[in-house]
Image (cartoon, grey):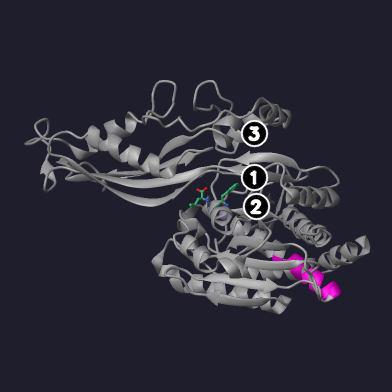
Amino acid sequence: MQDELTAVLERLELDRDGSTQRLFEFLRIPSVSADPAHTGEVARAARWVCDELRQVGLNAVVKPTAGHPMVVATHEGPPGYDGPRILYYGHYDVQPADPVALWKSGPFDPVLVDGPRGKRIVARGAADDKGQVMSFIEAFRGWIKSHGTLPCAVTVLLEGEEESGSENLEPFLKSHTAELAADLCVVSDTGMWDMQTPAITTRLRGLVYVEITIHGPDKDLHSGLYGGAVANPINVLASILASLHDGTRRVTLPGFYDDVEEVSPSVLAQWKALGFDDAEFLAGAGMADDFGEIGRSNMERTWSRPTCDVNGIYGGYMGKGAKTVIASHATAKVSFRLVAAQDPRKVIHSIETFVRERLPEGCRADFTEFGANPAFHVSEKSLYLGAAERALARVYGKPAVLIGSGGSIPAVGAISRILGAPSILMGFGLEDDCVHSPNEKFELGCFEGAKRSHAALLFEVGQMRR
Ligand code: BES
Ligand code: MN
Ligand code: MN
């Protein structure tokens, strides 16, 4: 039986260069979902990956939504198969390449360059998430080329709006529940522990994102003639934002910590045993010192504590030199990462109330919401977690570690709520991949390991019965 998998792994090895070339083609399509100027390219990426899935031997279609399209593909497994079905989720859209000037090569001109861990692929989307999506597509190709079939039934769902809020995902899941039904969902959009140590992510933080605009005077004013006598929306906004944290760097929204759970001592002990390297973590940010909630480690702060960050702030005169002006309005983009049972609706309500209660006479605020998703936890007892652990141990020769992540993938929670499928987050990125930053990269070694791991997971699931 195991020979079946060996044959697939050998074929993947033979097709190494071919698979890199195919990933390069995918990376050349600038599918930036956030930018309306790229809508045509996003659609082209959907068609490209759909064609690729068809060539591999799946039944694949591009399905329109109110926003960017979904790609859905299926394979029924071997004749007469009635074991578990995997739903693979991934995203074919990417973050904007800005600031483009900081890239050493074109963000959409993928290159293979030497690094300390061997060759790496540099391009926007290399690790997040096109390289990881291609790793399971290549695993499918390896299986079908070797044996004429996949060893289990598979459905693929690729989204084109993950990087801009997954707005149309929930309605799509709700209107396609039967078509997308599966026993487990596999997502490859997270990281490994290090290049030799595979990881399964068992918790993701949730995300609430709001834009807050404070309006004051009906036009920009001379700051000498009016300064000190009327409310300055930028001053007001800055003071409200500053009061969102207290002296211990905790978030001050009333009730914010009510639904936050402490990590159990056993999980905390397990995390400690991983030997998280604070210096290396900080070096990845170009920092020597940390700054966060007092009394918590950086691992806890990012994996199991909620946060509030201002992501952007603007208003008034932003040109060169000085202009003496009181702006009529000011805006901030504010995000909250959520953990455990924190309710995103409650947080939205709470930030709106917090701002309104602090507005001086004559000012008003408006709010635009860009997503509200709860945190996600994988049950460590899930049957399929065992299958992923066996697959990773087979490929890496050592057990996978169970980790948390500070990032968010809105789809994972939605898939569990709407389709009821438990998710396995089996990712192959590294902390220094520069996802969302200039010079994003994916180690070739991570790509190879990812393809092999998916091939092995398909094998493991094919051996299971429902
Ligand atoms: N793949 C990332 C999330 C991620 C990265 C999880 C690394 C774990 C390790 C995903 O594409 C992402 O960037 N998510 C966004 C949220 C989205 C609503 C824009 C995030 O976390 O900011
Ligand atoms: Mn991603
Ligand atoms: Mn991302």
Tell me which residue sits at (33%, 30%) in the image.
242
Q: Earlier in the sequence, mark 3 or mark 1?
A: 3
Residue bearing mark 3: 280
Q: Secondary structure at mark 1?
A: loop
Tell me which residue sits at (86%, 46%) in the image.
397
x and y percentages locating residue 172 in the rendered image: 50, 66
Foreground mark, 2 or 3, reads 2
x and y percentages locating residue 93 in the rendered image: 53, 63
Looking at the rendered structure, the kind of residue marked 2 is Pro
Looking at the rendered structure, the kind of residue marked 1 is Val
Q: Give neighbour class at mark 2: few <14, some 14-19, many 20+ (Cα, 10 Å).
A: many
* Gap in angstroms between the C-alphas marked 2 and 3: 33 Å
x and y percentages locating residue 89 in the rendered image: 62, 61
Q: Quadrant of the C terminus?
A: bottom right
Magenta segment boundaries in residue numbering: 137-147
Indicate yes or no whether the magenta region holds residue 377: no
* Gap in angstroms between the C-alphas marked 1 and 2: 7 Å
Residue bearing mark 1: 378
Residue 131, placed above or below residue 362: below
Residue bearing mark 2: 422
Looking at the rendered structure, the kind of residue marked 3 is Glu
Find residue 405 and report its image quarter: top right
Asked whether disc 1 touches disc 2, contact meaning CB atoms under 8 Å apart, the reply is: yes
